């Protein structure tokens, strides 16, 4: 047993001093206040006075590049970075090589993770224009949902067949997760700027090519289909103020059929940052204006946006070179997502309770994950201990991503992750990892 005592616990909308008793994989008890705690069996005691104890972060969108793209990252390296950042569970996307578009290929990824992943894991199955019958074979108990690119991005898995779209939204009972950018709008914008500037288009034009209008046109189409067929739809990485009108906060999360996610980079950066960071902050969808960033922050605080995640997508720096049309889109984030959100909380942009709600509770509720995402007796002991007053600066020496860089290089964060537990195992402890620990496959309520 392990007793984490005197911690400042942030959980379910409250912050209080208390202790948590871990028995094996699970939380046995949560104590509030400083009352004496009697544990009859031998236990390890950890004094967490002055430290924050949070549920482990659940990142609902990562690209760990395994299999087939492992020169950029793999399940071992990226999950190691994840637990160092307080991420204890993740959902990995299907645009690997081969693409996870059949049950067998999906299970191959689960088998990889069982031997390599420090954190708990789930893998979304990819939708193509012709794999509808394969999607129907999914066991809803052990697969979170299906991922559909309604806009082309890394991996070229664009689904643009109207019959396929109708069938997916009408026939697939799982959560449908979408990347929404209208391809025709993007291609038209590319031709416009090629005519204006030639092939060598600077990255500052990226949000003028992948515009708010391109996002809105695709997102609104997805929402229209979901409403028509009463599907469960979750739209990834919202990036514009324009799209906020498509979502609402009028129901508790568990009752919503249509939900939304925003990524840390869209809350942190704006288009004024392209001059400093260049292609390092080139993502799809693009980082847009400061007014868009502020609208996204407001949507998180008002519960129009339900989940905060990363879209962790490592590329080698050599792959990030070149013009707007050449440089790869995406960047690594899982090691720094929690501390970045805690930094925004320290600035007064979010509360600690809101950070935990959007990064821990909401993904568990939205995806119906079994016994995770909360500090509750009987739940898996996925926990993170954070020192809120331990400044540190991101440098190449402390970056754990296989690609070796971060858009946050040079940034000083005031909070540091000290310890991370996965299923009761102390997998990360002040910079040291327990190499024997492996995460578990996430299971879902049916």
Image (cartoon, rainbow, N blue to C red):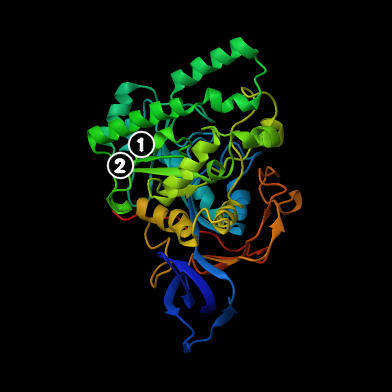
Determine whether 39 is above or below 16 in the image. below
Q: Are marks 2 and 1 in contact (CB under 8 Å)?
A: no
Q: Of the residues tagged 2 and 1, which is closer to the observer?
A: 1
Residue lying furthest top in this view? 195
Residue 118 locus on image (x, y percent):
57, 57
Determine whether 125 is above or below 321 in the image. below
What is the crowding at mark 1: few (fewer than 14 residues within 10 Å), some, or many (at least 20)? few
Pick the front one: 38 or 293:
293
Q: Residue at x 40, y 70 (%)?
A: 376
Residue 154 locus on image (x, y percent):
54, 31
Q: Which mark, by number, is residue 11?
A: none
Q: Badge 1 is on which residue?
A: 245
Q: Which mark, by number, is residue 232?
A: 2
Residue 262 locus on image (x, y percent):
47, 43
Residue lying furthest right in this view? 397
Tell me if I can see residue 181 in this picture: no
Q: Earlier in the sequence, mark 2 or mark 1?
A: 2
Q: Residue at x 70, y 59 (%)?
A: 392
Q: Residue at x 36, y 36 (%)?
A: 245
SS for callout 1: helix
SS for callout 2: loop
Tell me if I can see residue 430 in this picture: yes
Q: CA distance from mark 2 to mark 1?
A: 18 Å
């Amino acid at each position: 047993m392990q007793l984490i005592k005197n911690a400042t616990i942030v959980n379910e909308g409250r912050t209080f001093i208390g202790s948590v008793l871990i028995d094996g994989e699970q939380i046995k008890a949560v104590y509030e206040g400083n009352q004496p705690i009697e544990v009859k069996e031998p236990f390890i005691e950890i004094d967490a006075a002055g430290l924050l104890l949070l549920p482990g972060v659940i990142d609902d969108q990562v690209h760990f590049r395994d299999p087939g793209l492992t020169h950029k990252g793999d399940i071992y390296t990226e999950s190691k970075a994840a637990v160092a950042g307080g991420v204890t569970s993740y959902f990995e996307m299907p645009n690997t090589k081969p693409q996870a578009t059949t049950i067998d290929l999906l299970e191959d990824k689960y088998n990889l993770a069982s031997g390599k992943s420090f954190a708990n894991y789930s893998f979304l199955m990819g939708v193509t224009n012709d794999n509808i019958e394969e999607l129907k074979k999914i066991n809803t108990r052990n697969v979170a949902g299906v991922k559909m690119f309604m806009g082309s991005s890394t991996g070229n898995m664009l689904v643009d067949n109207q019959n396929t779209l109708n069938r997916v939204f009408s026939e697939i009972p799982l959560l449908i997760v979408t990347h929404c950018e209208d391809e025709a709008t993007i291609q038209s914008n590319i031709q416009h700027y090629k005519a204006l500037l030639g092939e060598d288009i600077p990255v500052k034009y990226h949000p003028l090519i992948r515009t708010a209008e391109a996002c809105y046109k695709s997102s609104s189409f997805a929402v229209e289909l979901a409403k028509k067929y009463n599907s469960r739809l979750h739209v990834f990485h919202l990036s514009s103020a324009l799209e906020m009108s498509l979502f609402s906060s009028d129901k508790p999360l568990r009752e919503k059929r249509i939900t939304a996610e925003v990524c840390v980079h869209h809350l942190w950066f704006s288009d004024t940052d392209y001059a400093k960071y260049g292609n390092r902050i080139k993502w799809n969808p693009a980082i847009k204006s400061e007014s868009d960033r502020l609208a996204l922050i407001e949507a998180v605080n008002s519960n129009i946006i339900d989940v905060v995640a990363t879209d962790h997508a490592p590329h080698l720096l050599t792959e990030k070179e070149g013009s707007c049309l050449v440089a790869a889109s995406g960047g690594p984030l899982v090691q720094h997502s929690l501390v970045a959100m805690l930094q925004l909380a320290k600035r007064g942009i979010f509360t600690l309770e809101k950070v935990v709600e959007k990064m821990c509770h909401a993904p568990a509720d939205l995806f119906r994950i079994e016994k995770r995402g909360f500090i509750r007796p009987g739940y898996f002991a996925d926990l993170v201990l954070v020192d809120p007053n331990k400044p540190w600066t991101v440098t190449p020496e402390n970056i754990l991503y296989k690609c070796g860089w971060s858009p946050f290089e040079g940034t000083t964060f005031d909070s540091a992750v000290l310890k991370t537990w996965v299923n009761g195992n102390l997998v990360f402890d002040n910079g040291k990892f327990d190499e024997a620990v492996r995460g578990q496959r996430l299971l879902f309520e049916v």
